[in-house]
Amino acid sequence: MTTFLLITFGAFLLSMVCGFIFIPWILNYCKLHQLYDIPNQRKMHHTFVPRLGGVSFLPSMMLAFVAALFVAGFNPGREITLHLWTVYFLIGILIIYCTGIVDDVLGVSPRTKFIAQIVAACCLPLAGLYVNNLYGLFGIEQIPAWAAMPLTVFIIVFIVNAVNLIDGIDGLCAGLCIIALAGYFIVFGLQNILTYCILIAGIIGVLTAYLYFNLFGKTENNRKIFMGDSGSLTLGFILAFLFVKYAMDNPHVMPYRKDGLLLSSTFLIIPVFDVVRLIFVRSYHRQPIFGADKNHVHHKLMRAGLSQHQALAAILLLAVGYIALNFSLGLVLSSTWVVVIDIVIFILFQLTVNVLIRKRGAQPFVLNPERNE
């Protein structure tokens, strides 16, 4: 266990150092080539901010991952194995990562971006990695491969876009991802799967460096940066991969876990619930489902009177609260009842925020931010 902790901490530390080295280089490059996120009515910032912070994520993570595996290979007491899943995961994440960079620099149409996400998502089922068991959710257990594979592709694309869309205020996407990654680190660690713990430690390391520049960097000193699509899409794909990996019922890798799907979902509950809510809201108000607006949970909290940092803290606390609640409820209730309770809590939370917004004389829903705000 001591060796395991040292290796994963080494991966975290190396990746964080890489982030502190790479991000200033990226900031200088963005300044030289005028690659900025331009403020508009829909965005929360009012100054020109570089948007390529996510470019540092994959190189930092992979350098730490390879170095940690190299060190772990000298440990005679632990065997490190890389399956076909890992290879296909690397192919998929490269597709997502490159798509995000091109979108940040040149711009990519939503159609092209969506196709790239589907192609990347297909890599995992093709390697034999898919959600094949719902563990009793709504009475469903095992799922045949012909249904599980397209379901998995849908889940991956959904998670990638949910993480991408939650990136609306400083620190939110990275903060939620760190919480989710920490959860996956614990559950994979309990299953004695070192490879994925190293991967997770690496991405948390570079996210720590990114948060320093994102939250505390000054625009006037050219030290503030956003992650852009290269970052949020990459994080979304990593989390989707970990979701599927832990949710899959495969006795050759991990023993049966009745909470496999519940915990995987809980770690991502805020971005997933927020996107589902937006789909319903936009459909009800006859707005384009894939359109842009200011109805995300962080937008609403700020209309209710919270500052950016207060909204960030509230959402992160809500995410941690859900994890603690579901872990406790999962010990005594079926996953179906836990999900129902989660939905009720989220609805009550949204209704409470709506009341606070109306008390301030504002509207809970902004249908056309370009005209209304």
Image: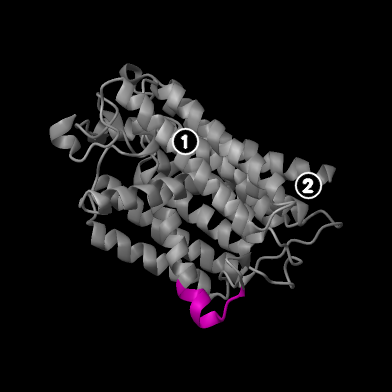
Residue 349 versus residue 73: which sits nearer the camera? 349
Q: Position of residue 288 (x, y in %)?
A: 21, 53
Of tags 1 and 2, the one toward the viewer is 1
Instruction: Give the vertical position of 98 relative to 344 (above or below).
Output: below
Residue 184 vs residue 147, the one in the foreground: 147
Q: Neighbour class for label 2 at 10 Å: few (<14), some, many (≥20)?
A: some
Image coordinates of residue 112 in percent, x first then y, are 26, 62
Which residue in the protein does label 1 denote? 349
In the image, which disc is placed on residue 4?
2
Query: Is 144 part of what is drawn in magenta?
Result: yes
Quadrant where the C terminus lies?
top left
Along the horizontal axis of the image, is 116 left or right of 66? Answer: left
State the separation of the CA atoms marked 1 and 2: 40 Å
> Which x, y percent locates residue 106?
22, 49
Give the residue at x 39% y 69%.
Answer: 119
Q: Which of the 4 image quadrants contains residue 357?
A: top left
Q: Report the side of 276 relative to 206 (left or right).
A: left
Q: Which amino acid does the dot numbered 2 rest on?
A: Phe
Which image quarter: residue 311? top left
What residue appears at the point 66 percent right and 40 percent down from the top-left corner?
Answer: 324
